Image (cartoon, rainbow, N blue to C red):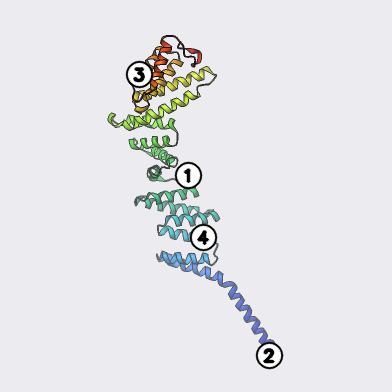
Amino acid sequence: MNVKRSRAMRLLLAGLTVGLVVACAPRDTETSAVRRGDEAFAQGDYDEALAEYRLAIRQGADDPSVTARVAHTYAMMGRVDDAGAYYVDASARDPGLIDQAVSDLMRLARIAQDGNDRFAMATAVETAMNLRPGVGVGGMSLPLARHYFRNGEYGRALPFYQKALADAVDESQPEVVFEVGVAHDEIGDCENALLFFERFREMVRPWERGEVDWYIGTCAFDLARGLLDRSVSEDPVEAEADLQLALELVNRTVEVGEPRNIQAQAWFEKGEILAELGQCQEAMDAYSQVRFADQAGGLIDRAQDRFDEIRFGRGLEHLRDGRCR
């Protein structure tokens, strides 16, 4: 009987030992994989380190520090997209890893900048800024702005252009000022675009103003038309202020002479505004210029009718107060 009990006890202990080994094996395996990964990383064998770290994750390691090891290894290998994805995951679970993530990503951005890889630079910076909004980008402001500009992402380009202009020690390069104007124009912000176009115009020689004059004339005319559409205010002071500003803008379109295909319309609108303001002779002079503008077309007859209404006193009933009669 004692022999049978002794044998049964040995079998029970053996079973418990096997169970403990099985229970501890996954955790020990994960730890071993991480340790092997650390050893490989220390020796500069990043491929091997990466394989071990990823093995640990597949075996169930859910510690964000292991995910951060994968991200850091990818960063050392220059793989921006992979490093960013793993850092986002790790940082979401442990915000204490954000410093390491941002440091690695900005280092990758600078390396990409040196290698003229604008896409990798932008990707690294975007990920870093998502993890820590407002992180400084140093001398990458202008390259980032131009990267987005050339890819048609004008809204994303503008904050980097603004940073580049703010950081400029010397007078900004004219082409940068022009690009900022175009970016504003492309997002429909003609008011700010016009400020930068006028600034650029002052920075260059007269024979270099052809393209910017087109933008200035277009933006000024669009802004003027917007004001005219709005100038139905019942407040006479506000309405007249809108008309005066619209007149300044239309005058600017006429002054630069661009775009040529809207000059007739610009002269006609100038006549309309002046008539509305009661400046009758000036209005007639503006209407008279319509026939000399390119592509006047049907506006010639309309301008002549307006001219005659003022000259012969038939009135402009559609104008508020009928000032020029």
SS for callout 1: loop
| Distance CA(mark 2)–CA(mark 4) | 52 Å
Front residue of 101 and 238:
238
Q: Residues within 10 Å of mark 4 (few under 14, many from 20)?
A: some
Front residue of 190 and 39:
190
Residue annotated with mark 2: 3
Sequence-wise first label, 2 or 3 = 2
Question: Is residue 281 in sight in this rendering?
Answer: yes
Position of residue 69 measured from the top left corner of the image (x, y, whole percent): 48, 61
Position of residue 100 measured from the top left corner of the image (x, y, whole percent): 47, 55
Q: Are marks 2 and 3 in contact (CB under 8 Å)?
A: no
The reply, left or right, for residue 40 in relation to residue 16 is left
Position of residue 49 measured from the top left corner of the image (x, y, whole percent): 44, 65
**Residue most extreme to the top:** 312
Residue annotated with mark 1: 134
Above or below, 113 against 69 in this view is above
Question: Is residue 173 in sight in this rendering?
Answer: no
Residue annotated with mark 3: 289
Q: Are marks 3 and 1 in contact (CB under 8 Å)?
A: no
SS for callout 4: helix
| Distance CA(mark 3)–CA(mark 1) | 53 Å
| Distance CA(mark 4)–CA(mark 3) | 75 Å
Residue annotated with mark 4: 65
Type of amino acid at the residue the image marks with label 4: Ser
The reply, left or right, for residue 182 in relation to residue 85 is left
Quadrant in the rendering for residue 21: bottom right
| Distance CA(mark 2)–CA(mark 3) | 124 Å
Sequence-wise first label, 2 or 4 = 2
Q: Residues within 10 Å of mark 3 (few under 14, many from 20)?
A: some
